[in-house]
Amino acid sequence: MNFLQWMAVLGILLLILALASAYLRWLPVTTSLIYLGFGLLIGELGIGLWQMEFIHIASWMEHLTEIAVLVSLFVSGLKLRMPLRHPAWKSAYVLAGPVMLACIAGVAALCHYVIGLGWGISVLIGAILAPH
């Protein structure tokens, strides 16, 4: 598939999620799970639309994950609607500080030692999968 076809697939996925967001709010399903399911559907386990070895796309996949982490943090920051001196920020500081760092470190160590990935990509995967 060429770039335009991939952008059409991505646009359809985003449109479906935007239209279904009101229904997803009431279900015990996150958008991350929907994205994972969509990835499995178009991958080798599903209809076979994506048939590529990850070693061949590792360089641009690394940049894509960096962008995903930045966008995710930016959107999460936009959702916060309290002044910085509000007492509710204390739990956010604890969760964003030591808890998130421990989660990132744990996933990175698992990816590095169990799966055998390099430290750079392991930390990126840990940052993406960390709760935010």
Image: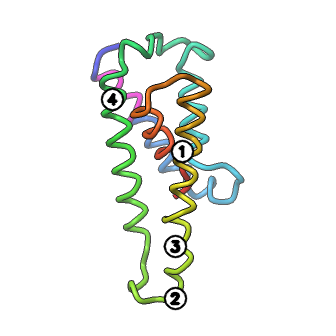
Q: Nearer the viewer, mark 4 or mark 1?
A: 1
For image coordinates 70% across by 54% down, the residue present is 27
First in sequence: mark 2 or mark 1?
Answer: 2
Q: Nearer the viewer, residue 125 or 53?
A: 125
In terms of secondary structure, where does tag 4 sit?
helix
Q: Position of residue 101 (x, y in %)?
A: 51, 55
Q: Mark 4 or 2, which is nearer the eye?
A: 2
Labels 1 & 3 near each other (Cβ < 8 A):
no
For disc 4, the marked residue is 7
Circle 2 residues within 10 Å: few <14, some 14–19, many ≥20: few
Residue 128 % position (x, y): 48, 44
Residue on which the image places disc 2: 87
Between marks 2 and 1, how big is the CA–CA gap? 27 Å
Q: Are marks 4 and 2 in contact (CB under 8 Å)?
A: no
State the mark number for residue 129: 1
Disc 1 element: helix
Please name whichever residue, 28 or 130, is drawn nearer the observer in this view of the structure: 130
- Marks 4 and 1, Cα distance to the nearest angstrom? 24 Å
Between discs 4 and 2, the one toward the N terminus: 4
What residue range appears in magenta? 4-10
Q: CA distance from mark 1 to mark 3?
A: 18 Å
* Count of numbered labels shown in the rendering: 4
Q: Is residue 9 magenta?
A: yes
Say if 16 sits above or below 103 in the image.
Answer: above
**Left or right of residue 7: residue 34:** right
Label 3 packing within 10 angstroms: few (<14), some (14-19), many (20+): few
Disc 3 to disc 4, C-alpha distance: 35 Å
Q: Between 48 and 65, which is closer to the camera in this rendering?
A: 65
